[in-house]
Amino acid sequence: AQSVTQLDSQVPVFEEAPVELRCNYSSSVSVYLFWYVQYPNQGLQLLLKYLSGSTLVESINGFEAEFNKSQTSFHLRKPSVHISDTAEYFCAVTRQTGANNLFFGTGTRLTVIP
Amino acid sequence: DVKVTQSSRYLVKRTGEKVFLECVQDMDHENMFWYRQDPGLGLRLIYFSYDVKMKEKGDIPEGYSVSREKKERFSLILESASTNQTSMYLCASSLSRIRVNTEAFFGQGTRLTVV
């Protein structure tokens, strides 16, 4: 089975400061990795995903994540956060073959302070 | 754009009532999922379906059932609501069982309160 660990439940950060949201996963098979974002009172939206190829993937709003197979990590980073980045962020994995259920971490609430 | 629509944003029900949560997607996706979201626990899978009339249990199916009579609609049923089922319920869909690298699209969520 797959599992995802997000160690930081809450991350407060000042506006324009850098941020890293940590994600580690466990799986006996190859997986695809995702970050989803949930803005207040909304459903989840895909932020970025790693399928294959370059281990560094980027989103359109300045976030990036790096797949590290040896450390089984997929940390999310942004060099300079905005107030509008305040949201809950979920890391998720799914098997590359077979049942493609998404397994989610417990989420990290990012609060950007003006 | 894919749209996943959940019939209610907020519901208040009494203990013991039968509760139906409806979800409709408009992109001909094969896969549909029901999750519940609780603080500190993330999203936990209740049931999922890969095809019409097909269902499989997720991680926490107890106290729930589902129905998928049409490809676009996936219903979650609480046979006898209890206070510990107070939660946010999220429906999602994705393209197919074969195309596992495609993203899941989520509805806005239904916040259910059982009193």
Image: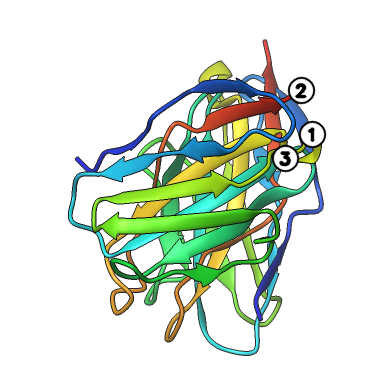
Which quadrant of the rendered structure holds the N terminus of chain B? Answer: top left
The correct choice, above or below, for B63 with respect to A112 in the image is below
Q: How is the structure coloured here?
A: rainbow
Residue type of the residue flagged with mark 2: Val
The residue at the point 57 percent across, 39 percent down is: B89
Per the rendering, the mark at residue B83 is: 1
* Image position, residue A27 (x, y; %): 65, 82
Secondary structure of residue under mark 1 = helix
Residue B49 is left or right of residue A25, and the answer is left
Per the rendering, the mark at residue B85 is: 3
Nearer-N-terminus badge (3/2): 3
Q: Quadrant of residue B24?
A: top left
The correct choice, above or below, for A29 with respect to B18 in the image is below
* Image position, residue B100 (x, y; %): 36, 73
Q: Are marks 1 and 3 in contact (CB under 8 Å)?
A: yes
Nearer-the-camera pick, B91 or A107: B91
